[in-house]
Image: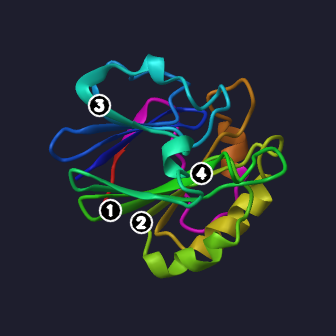
Amino acid sequence: MPRLLYQGHASFRLTADDGRVVYVDPFAGKGYEVPADLILVTHQHSDHNKVKLCTRKPDCQLITNFEALAGDRHNSFDIGGILIQAVEACNSHHDPKKCVGYIITMAGVKIYFSGDTSMTEQMKGFSTLSLDYAIFPGDGFANMKIKEAAECARLVGAKHNIICHLQPGMLFNKRKAEKWDAPNKLIITPAEEIELD
């Protein structure tokens, strides 16, 4: 089964069954010593794009919002069977022409990384995608508050919902996460790794 390591803030590491490693929005926490096959960046704010933290394999690929939005559309990528679909991400602090989320399909498991966003029009169609995991921000400063994040979780309809990006300057805010009123809530704390099914 693929594994998901929460590094803190909005930073995650995915590990495929075959050992390939994908980092998403590197910035916070530990665990960057495992060499990357792929690095994904949702946008260029400094708390999401510290790609130099990641140890990389010689053939590591980097997909940022620039590649994801090339041609003024949300692009998709097939990286050796790991499927990446860029999707909308936006709010008053995040320009939709400069920001994306990603839906990653790995070994049949679909994970939605929303990036920094509030509710988007595109989310309304995600319930048809049979997402296994959905990851939302909820700081209420640069992103939506946890109440709206819970509304997004209900709209998207993933089997498991994860909250992150909860407190500027902190890896995580567990007290705030516990108040998040989302269905199928899964609280993951920094340095915790889970198996994805």
Q: Earlier in the sequence, mark 4 or mark 3?
A: 3
For the magenta stretch, what is the residue range?
A: 179-193
Residue holding disc 1: 109
Q: Amino acid at mark 2?
A: Asp
Q: Amino acid at mark 4?
A: Val
State the image coordinates of residue 194 (x, y, percent, origin top left).
36, 45
Q: Amino acid at mark 3?
A: Cys
Category of crowding for the residue at label 2, using alpha-carbon neighbours closer than 10 angstroms: few (below 14), some (14–19), many (at least 20): some
Q: Are marks 4 and 2 in contact (CB under 8 Å)?
A: no
Residue at disc 2, secondary structure: loop
Q: Are marks 4 and 1 in contact (CB under 8 Å)?
A: no
Mark 4 and mark 2: span between their CA atoms? 19 Å
Between residues 166 and 86, which one lies in front from this camera angle?
86
Residue holding disc 3: 60
Between residues 134 and 181, which one lies in front from this camera angle?
134
Numbered label attached to residue 100? 4
Q: Amino acid at mark 1?
A: Val
Between residues 109 and 24, which one lies in front from this camera angle?
24
Q: Quadrant of residue 183?
A: bottom right
State the image coordinates of residue 18 (x, y, percent, origin top left).
15, 44
Residue at disc 4, secondary structure: strand
